[in-house]
Amino acid sequence: MAITLSASDIPGAPLSARLSPPQVWGILLLVPYLLIFAAFVVYPVGYGLWLARQPSSYVALFHDPIFARAAVNTLIFLVIGINIKMLIALFLSGFFVQQRGWIKWLSVVFILPWAVPSIPTILSVRFMLNPEWGMVNQLIFKFTGEDGPNWLNDPTVALSMAIGVHIWKSLPFWTLILMTGRLAIPHDLFEAADVDGATWWQKFRFITWPSMQTLYITCTLLSMIWTLGDFNSVYLLTGGGPADLTHVLSTLGIRYLRLDQLSLAMASIVCALPFVLPLVYFMMKRLSR
Amino acid sequence: MKLPGLGEFTWRDVGIEARLLLIGIPVFIWTMIPIYHMFVFAISPKEDAFSGKLWPVHPTLNNFEIVFHQKHYFLRDFWLQFGNSVFIAAAVGILTLLIATCAAFSISRLKVPGSRMVMNLALFTYFIPAAFLAVPMYRTMGNYGLLNSHLALILAMVTIASPYAIWVLKQASDKLPVELDEAAVMDGATTLQIFRLVYVPLMMPSLVAIGTYAVLLAWNEYLYAFLLLSNEKQLTLPVALGNFLAADDSPWELLMTTGFIYALPPAAVYYAFKRYMVGGLTAGAVKS
């Protein structure tokens, strides 16, 4: 130890001599991740940005009506879809913290959508909504004698269904997270409120919400960032159709990629960055403490 | 103070219970519908599957036999693709664990200069939406000459899994007391001995959680697998499932059966390791 310390005092000594053995190991142990990071994050991102450098790709992008539609759809997905999901999660987290045997069992079942892969379940929903053969329309026919709507052929309905699939899949995860937040609230606060005769709403308004609002807002923002990358819910349910009217930015990027228009794909992603980067910055501030 | 009468008390309880059931029953139905629908298809013969019945008239396990014996054109490589999925999930799990454990040990225990920066870079990667990174990643793999190889998918999934893995492991190892390392140094342990004999055994619960996370992530991945692999013999199961859609006369009952079989292993793994997942992951997922 003493030898390495004195070596570190010599100016101009080689780097390895100026570091203690644990620090040399520390750097060596970081190398595998740094290699992965350089090869599969830095290089692709840099290369992608370089591909998107030409103004002409942005002109072409803004002249593509599909892009405008996808941008609007993405906004609807994030602003409406995510907020509905988080409100339901907040509500259900209050349900699942109740001490009941059957609620414990229900919570085990409730986590299933999160535990199983999304592909088979989304395809299952897709077939369920099939206008001729799907279970939904067959049941509608059986009970009303009328033909059910062509669910995935109307852009508004199809997008709502995609949002529904997204909610189905990720609701359990966020409910679980918000449950941990609720369980962290000291119980005597509620007991004191009960003694004072507080109503259900007052307990929520003055105890639950103040202690959970930071967690809730963090979760909402995090869910928005992740949902931007949700490719499966839209692609596997609607395929972007009908007539490319239900694309979101993630499926649109892949669509351009499949059409071999890589610069357009990258340009559409670059257009999303002004919205994504502030969210990412905020999340990093919250999480890197 | 007057105690509430017994009858009054039970009525109140019944009321609460009824209201809870009023929430619980719709939640149960909502959760189960797509899964139940998939299950009904898996046990239905072809003619029942398309009749929209809530329970097939002649339930059968025949579909499973067709899948297991690869007796359909779409399923001719089922076992090969199943094997591909297993291999890729296992490789991603092992590589992610190796890389993330080393990095977390270095960042949290050795506190190398600049390691905080590495943590922030990893965290930043964690927030890049996966579908956005997929576009340049596809081209990058082409430039590296890795397209259509399992290695490409494995490396891509390790890239996506390791930031979260490093972050969770760092949070967990920050909680281990520094005195442990100091005592080990006093006893003359080298850095590698501390890593092997002190750090890894103490971190076991988090390592199990992260290993499970990476395995499930890789097993469930559709987008990257579908972009990076195109050779029929190399596909993973989710891509093969997606390819069913390409045909007009898709055998949906077989698609659902295959999907059901594909969904079972991750569900089993999830429930088997739930203990670790809930403690290890949700605590780290969102720090309040």
Image (cartoon, grey):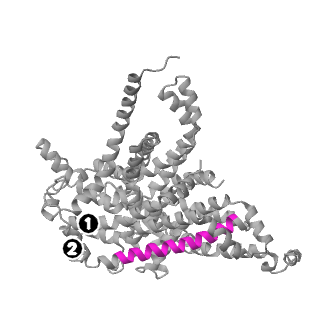
**What's drawn in magenta, residue-wise?**
B82-108
Task: Name the main secondary structure of what is drawn in magenta.
Answer: helix
Q: Quadrant of the N terminus of chain A?
A: bottom right
Of residues A1 and A132, the one nearer the viewer is: A1
Please state which amino acid type lies under the numbered disc 1. Answer: Thr
Answer above or below: position of B195 versus A64. below
Of residues A99 and B29, the one nearer the viewer is: A99
Report if the CB atoms under discs 1 and 2 are less than 8 Å apart: yes
Determine the secondary structure under disc 1.
Answer: helix
- Counting from the top left corner in percent of width and height, residue A94 is at 46, 39
- Counting from the top left corner in percent of width and height, residue B243 is at 28, 70
Determine the secondary structure under disc 2.
Answer: helix
Q: Quadrant of residue B61?
A: bottom left
Q: Which residue is mark 1?
A: B257
Q: Marks 1 and 2, Cα distance to the nearest angstrom?
A: 9 Å
- Say if the magenta span includes residue B107: yes
Q: Quadrant of residue A57?
A: bottom left
Residue that protrudes farthest toward the left in the picture: A145
> What number is the disc on residue B66?
2
Please state which amino acid type lies under the numbered disc 2. Answer: Ile
> What number is the disc on residue B50?
none
Q: Which residue corresponds to the image point at 18% horizontal and 65% vertical from the top-left? A: B60
Of residues A2 and B138, the one nearer the viewer is: A2
- Counting from the top left corner in percent of width and height, residue A91 is at 44, 39
